[in-house]
Image (spheres, rainbow, N blue to C red):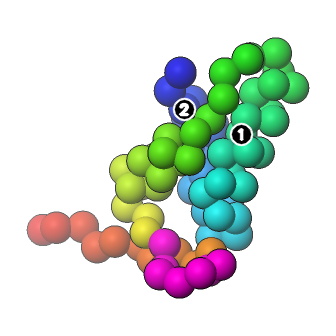
């Protein structure tokens, strides 16, 4: 199941605070609370971030983000 627009918005707003694994866990928990028995994977979160143009800084335990520049 693809991420909904609300879930993508959640990823965009929280990706500078949480790691991708934590975001996937939170989205899975929210889905289960709503009765949807489908998990969110780390890859789904990562791909959503890439489509939004958001990259993570390298390093262990860092949750800082970098906005990628658009090609002109």
Judging from the image, what secondary structure is the residue with disc 1 in? helix
Q: Main secondary structure of the magenta part?
A: loop
Q: Residue furthest right?
A: 33
Q: Which residue is mark 1?
A: 27
Relative to residue 55, is residue 34 depicted above or below?
above
Quadrant of the image containing the C terminus: bottom left
Q: Position of residue 45 (x, y in %)?
A: 53, 47
Tell whether 50 sits left or right of 12: left
Of the image marks 1 and 2, the number of the one nearer the N terminus = 2
Q: Are marks 1 and 2 in contact (CB under 8 Å)?
A: yes
Q: Residue furthest left?
A: 72
In the foreground, 43 or 33:
43
In this picture, which residue range is highlighted in magenta? Answer: 56-62
In the foreground, 64 or 67:
64
| Residue 60 among magenta residues | yes
Relative to residue 72, is residue 5 depicted above or below?
above
Tell whether 60 sits left or right of 48: right
Q: Position of residue 46 (x, y in %)?
A: 48, 52
Judging from the image, what secondary structure is the residue with disc 2 in? loop
In the foreground, 8 or 36:
36
Report how far apart the C-alphas of labels 1 and 2 lie in the structure. Answer: 9 Å
| Residue 5 among magenta residues | no
Q: Position of residue 29 (x, y in %)?
A: 81, 36
Q: Residues within 10 Å of mark 1 (few under 14, many from 20)?
A: many
Tell me which corner region of the image, top left, top right, bottom left or bottom right, holds residue 18: bottom right
* Residue at image location 62% in from the left, 35% down from the top: 40
Q: Which residue is mark 2?
A: 3
Relative to residue 44, is residue 35 depicted above or below?
above
Q: Position of residue 8 (x, y in %)?
A: 56, 43
């Amino acid at each position: 199941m693809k991420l909904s627009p609300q879930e993508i918005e959640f990823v965009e707003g929280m990706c500078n605070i949480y790691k991708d694994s934590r975001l996937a866990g939170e989205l899975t928990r929210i889905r289960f609370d709503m009765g949807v028995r489908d998990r969110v994977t780390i890859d789904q979160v990562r791909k959503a971030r890439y489509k939004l143009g958001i990259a993570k800084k390298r390093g262990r335990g860092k949750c800082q983000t970098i906005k990628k520049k658009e090609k002109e």
